[in-house]
Amino acid sequence: AQKVTQAQTEISVVEKEDVTLDCVYETRDTTYYLFWYKQPPSGELVFLIRRNSFDEQNEISGRYSWNFQKSTSSFNFTITASQVVDSAVYFCALSEVNTGGFKTIFGAGTRLFVKA
Amino acid sequence: GAVVSQHPSRVICKSGTSVKIECRSLDFQATTMFWYRQFPKQSLMLMATSNEGSKATYEQGVEKDKFLINHASLTLSTLTVTSAHPEDSSFYICSARGGLAGGGLTYEQYFGPGTRLTVT
């Protein structure tokens, strides 16, 4: 069965610090997708990134970067030079293609507080 | 990108009444829709998966008679919370996946903005 673990419940940093949000996943499927979403206080999910299981290239988008390592089943997310607007709950999620019917299962989320 | 809307965005109802939440895909045909529930400060929990024209598949522990899901068209799915009670108060989020022109489903899943239900 698919599972996503975000061990960090809450993280608090001071503005301009770098912060890494951890995500570890479990799946028996060979084909799957990994996602990160941001959920601000409004509640609406904001899509950040999607990665398929065959693409282990790390990605950088502005201050955001993602490190996908199949060997450790991890898909960590780093925010460089954090800003107050980054304060939100961040969810890592997993969709299994062959065995999960594309259902997306979410981790527990990490609440990030960025202080000015 | 594709847009998914939900209506209403907020609803307050009295205990014992039923509430219907609509989820619409605005610019694509959603062959599959998912309904999630999120309690305060918790994660999104998948409630059910619905494919257009067929019965929804509920996750373990979700009462199908309480949470009625109808996916009657390729752009609309509804979730009806029947005989709502205060413990049903939650944030309900739908998401939709569309079909590809050549057949099959896209892996893209688009989320609606959510509906906050409060049962008094």
Image (cartoon, helix red, strand yellow):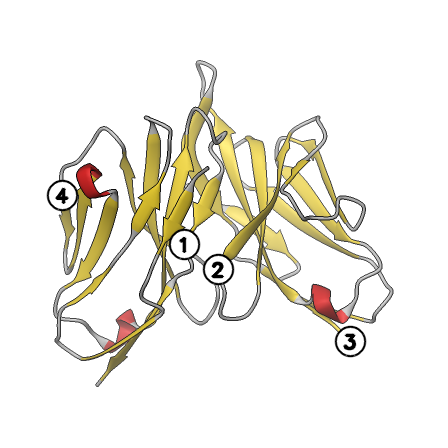
Q: Are marks 3 and 1 in contact (CB under 8 Å)?
A: no
Q: Which residue matches tag 1?
A: A107
Residue at 71% from the left image edge and 64% from the top image edge: B88
Say above or below: A57 vs B67. above
Horizontal arrangement in the rendering, residue A49 relative to residue A64 (left or right)? right
- The secondary element bearing badge 3 is classed as loop
Q: Amino acid at mark 3?
A: Thr
Say which of A29 and B18 sits in front.
A29
Gap between marks 3 and 2 measured at Cα:
23 Å
The answer to whether residue B2 shows anywhere in this view is no
Return the chain for callout 4: A
- The secondary element bearing badge 2 is classed as loop
Q: Amino acid at mark 4?
A: Asn
Q: Which residue matches tag 4?
A: A58
Say which of B88 and B98 sits in front.
B88
Gap between marks 3 and 1 measured at Cα:
30 Å
Q: Are marks 2 and 1 in contact (CB under 8 Å)?
A: yes
Say which of B6 and B39 sits in front.
B39
Q: Are marks 4 and 3 in contact (CB under 8 Å)?
A: no
Return the chain for callout 2: B
Q: Amino acid at mark 1?
A: Gly
Q: Position of residue A27 (x, y in %)?
A: 37, 36
Gap between marks 4 and 3 measured at Cα:
48 Å
Gap between marks 2 and 1 measured at Cα:
7 Å
Return the chain for callout 3: B
Q: Which residue matches tag 3?
A: B120
Q: Position of residue B28 (x, y in %)?
A: 51, 33
